[in-house]
Image (cartoon, helix red, strand yellow):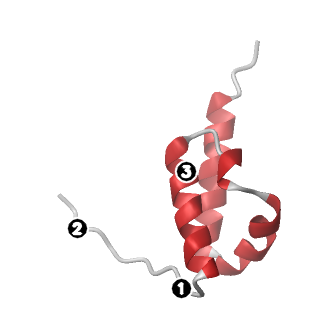
Amino acid sequence: MIDYSDKIKRSEQDIISLLILSPNSIYFFIENISPRDFKDKRHAIIYRAIQYLFFQKKQLTLFPLPQF
């Protein structure tokens, strides 16, 4: 039996990464994926936040986190 949970998790991470690194990709995902499509709740929350920024016409800004 194949365990797809790792593949699903990785796919969700890839989608989030793509949205962060290539903001124009949001136009595809906005029409095809909703936060309910994510199995990992954390990924759904991040995706919902990206959607919110998009609809508010605000740009996603990344900032470095300090190393501990």
Which residue is located at x 43 percent, y 77 percent? 62
The amino acid marked with disc number 2 is Pro
Which label sits in the foreground, 1 or 2? 1
In this picture, is 38 found above or below 60? above
Report, in whole angstroms, how far the alpha carbon at label 3 lies from the one at label 2.
Answer: 22 Å
Which residue is located at x 62 percent, y 32 percent? 6
Horizontal side, residue 56 vs residue 33: left or right: left
Q: Which of the marked residues, 1 or 2, is nearer the chain's N terminus?
A: 1
- Please identify the quadrant where the N terminus is shown: top right
Residue 60 or residue 36, whichever sits in front: 36
Instruction: Identify the residue under disc 3.
Output: 43
| Residue 21 spot, x, y in % from top left | 59, 73
Horizontal side, residue 66 vs residue 15: left or right: left
Instruction: Identify the residue under disc 2.
Output: 66
Q: Secondary structure at mark 2?
A: loop
| Residue 60 spot, x, y in % from top left | 51, 79
Q: Are marks 3 and 1 in contact (CB under 8 Å)?
A: no
The reply to whether residue 20 is in sight is no
Q: Residue most toward the top?
A: 1
Report, in whole angstroms, how far the alpha carbon at label 1 lies from the one at label 2.
Answer: 22 Å
Q: Secondary structure at mark 1?
A: loop
The amino acid marked with disc number 1 is Gln
Report, in whole angstroms, how far the alpha carbon at label 3 lies from the one at label 1.
Answer: 19 Å
| Residue 52 spot, x, y in % from top left | 57, 72
The amino acid marked with disc number 3 is His
| Residue 9 occupies quadrant | top right
